[in-house]
Amino acid sequence: MTPEGTTGPDKKFWYLQNHRLFDQLDDEAIAKLCIISRYKEAGRGEHIFFTEDTTDRIFILKTGAVKIVQTDGEGNEVVKDVLGDHDLFGHLPSQGRGSRAEEHAVALTDDVSICTFTRSDFEQVLARNPQVSLRLASHIGDKLRALEQRYDSLVFKDVRARLIEFLRRYVHQFAAERAPDGSVPNHLRQEDIAQLIGCTRQTVAELMGELEREGLLHYSRRRIRLA
């Protein structure tokens, strides 16, 4: 959490200084990042980006959780990913420059704090700071491995196994918010979970009921706990 009373530029500085991508940089380097970045706070349900003006930006999530959503030509939304503290999204330097106007992020919590950079500014940061490049490469590697695991799960595992694997990954992702009883906040609807594991909401509801009866899961609108 930020120091009490920290606001404006000081809050931006604090967030960048304590982000795992930049925590090796000195105060002067952090101050330069503050000059070229924008800081934004968002509340639950707020769209983080959705327009052409923001599709060529890097978003660095300091606190809170967001879901990445894709909208088709008919306006239907599909949840593609869930991100938590310290994650990155948007046009990362390793990606192509194809249009991403159909994708946006939605705040899942009331305390979302992000800093954003234009892609060109962020590439200059990487060029000046090799240690940041290494951290980013590690982050992208982790994301690619996670995508590979999700693909393997969709191909080789049944829906029940995919649901259990997703719930374990979700609980681990939000372990920093774990309560004494082992539960973590539930930021997702059953429909969101269904889209993430490739099935219907009805199937998710039925399987969750089954897992609860077996004593393997406690699920509510507010909390998720695995046995």
Image: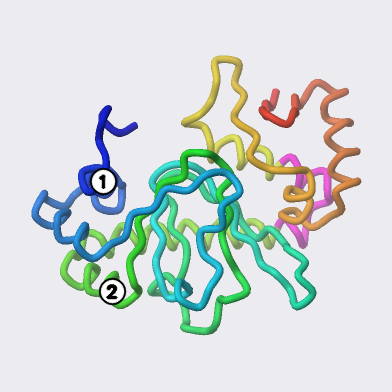
Relative horizontal placement of residue 98, taking residue 215 as reference (left or right): left
| Residue nearest the observer in this picture, 214 or 85 | 85
Relative horizontal placement of residue 136, taking residue 217 as reference (left or right): left
Location of residue 112 in the rendering, given as x and y in whole percent from the top left corner: 46, 45
Mark 2 or 1: the one toward you:
1
Name the residue: 59% across, 21% down.
182
Determine which residue is flagged by label 1: 8
Residue sticking out furthest to the top: 180
Mark number displayed over residue 116:
none
Name the residue: 83% across, 51% down.
158
Question: Is the residue marked by circle 1 packed among few (<14), some (14-19), or many (20+) residues within 10 Å?
Answer: few
Whether 215 is drawn above or below 151: the answer is above
Question: Is the residue marked by circle 2 packed among few (<14), some (14-19), or many (20+) residues within 10 Å?
Answer: some
Mark 2: amino acid: Glu
SS category of the residue bearing label 1: helix
Mark 1: amino acid: Gly
Mark closer to the chain start, 2 or 1: 1
Location of residue 224 in the rendering, given as x and y in whole percent from the top left corner: 68, 29
Residue sticking out furthest to the left: 28
Q: CA distance from mark 2 to mark 1?
A: 25 Å
Q: State yes or no: residue 156 in magenta.
A: yes
The magenta stretch is 153-164
Location of residue 143 in the rendering, given as x and y in whole percent from the top left corner: 50, 59
Q: Quadrant of residue 79?
A: bottom right
Relative horizontal placement of residue 48, taking residue 4 as reference (left or right): right
Q: Secondary structure of the magenta portion, mostly? A: helix
Determine which residue is flagged by label 2: 123
Relative horizontal placement of residue 112, taking residue 166 as reference (left or right): left
Q: Quadrant of residue 166?
A: top right
| Residue nearest the observer in this picture, 119 or 210 | 119
Name the residue: 74% across, 48% down.
193
SS category of the residue bearing label 2: helix
